[in-house]
Image (spheres, rainbow, N blue to C red):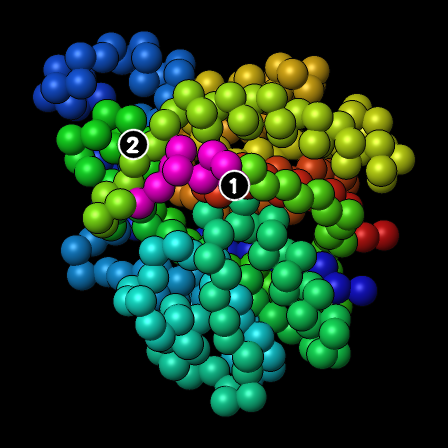
Amino acid sequence: MLGIHCIASYVPENRRSNLDPDTLAAFEIEEDFIRKKIGVVNRAVKSAGQDTSDLALAALERLCDKAGINRDDIQVIVVVTQNPDNNLPHVAAQVHGKAGLSERCAAFDVGLGCSGYVYGLSIIQSFMESNGFEKGVLITADPYSKIVDPADKNTTLLFGDAATATLISRQPLYAVGPFSFGTKGTLSEALICRDGKLHMNGREVFNLTATGVPPDIKNLLARAGLEKDEVDLYLLHQGSKYIVDTIRSRLGVSPERVPLGLEDVGNTVSSSIPLLLEEAISRSDVSMMVLSGFGVGLSWASCICKRGS
């Protein structure tokens, strides 16, 4: 059985504060709004010399050290990103070369954003199962600092940079599935990069996630034969504190079961869920989790993670 074996992450040391007096004045906002609505106090930002493949490589190297992986044993790497170093080649190939992985290792990218980690789990597990692979790595690296306009209040206060690497193996800590997916492509321009700059219609994104994600999670639980109180943690994409609180309220679950992790890093797109999951899988009291990502597309994806016996 394939599943999640280990997770490691890389978060740049550099931070930009949303509570900087000049920032608050420029956008005419109060500290209370930052803390209670956005939820991001500091944003992690890559250095000028780092690119997407560098962040991805750093996460992979930390995973190899943490899990004691022999790099020659990695049979596939999948990188989830919408902000590659270049239009081509794919980031996975660049990471493959920098990491010195085996020439027999498959490597490809998945062009998804906030729902990308959950999609990626399904993709890499299916790919490994169909090819009889034993070890694969799912990497997330989507530095939005490359496309965010510092003068855009709607985006610059939200997004941070990070990368994660998840080892998928046949000796997992957690089995993953079933999954649920959805797309509303008619709203795809609500979150779009034009001429190298990110544009976001926050109301459209909020409305879709607030109305679409809670029923999707409830339907997933019903399919799995689970009650909501049987789930120890709900790990939601960290779009903002307000959206996480809204989904939690509409699910009817307590705050301690829906952790927040964006205060000191920001919304790290496809990396937000695995950043939470890295800590969660180390806890002996967590047996059942729901993961749910939502955003760019507009798309959403949810799945169940269950600790093995």
Q: Residues within 10 Å of mark 1 (few under 14, many from 20)?
A: few
Badge 1 or badge 2: first in the primary sequence: 2
Q: Position of residue 216 (x, y in %)?
A: 70, 32
Write the residue at 26% across / 45% down.
194
Q: Amino acid at mark 1?
A: Gly
Q: Residue 42, image x and y in percent? A: 29, 32
**Circle 1: element type:** helix
Picture residue at 61% right of the left edge, 70% below the top: 136
Find out whether the residues at labels 1 and 2 contact each other: C-beta distance under 8 Å: no
The residue at which mark 1 appears reads as 185
Q: Quadrant of residue 303?
A: top right
Question: Which region shows up in magenta?
Answer: 185-193
Q: Is residue 264 visible?
A: no
Outermost residue toward the bottom in this view: 103
Q: Is residue 200 left or right of residue 298?
A: left
| Three-letter code, disc 2 | Thr
> Viewer-proximal residue, 307 or 130?
130
- Magenta stretch contains residue 231: no
Mark 2 lies on a secondary structure that is: helix
Where does the N terminus fall, quadrant-wise?
bottom right
User: Can residue 187 be found in the magenta stretch?
Assistant: yes
Q: Which residue is mark 2?
A: 155
Which residue is rendered at x = 25% and y = 33% of the image?
A: 156
**Which residue corresponds to the image point at 73% horizontal and 52% vertical from the top-left?**
176
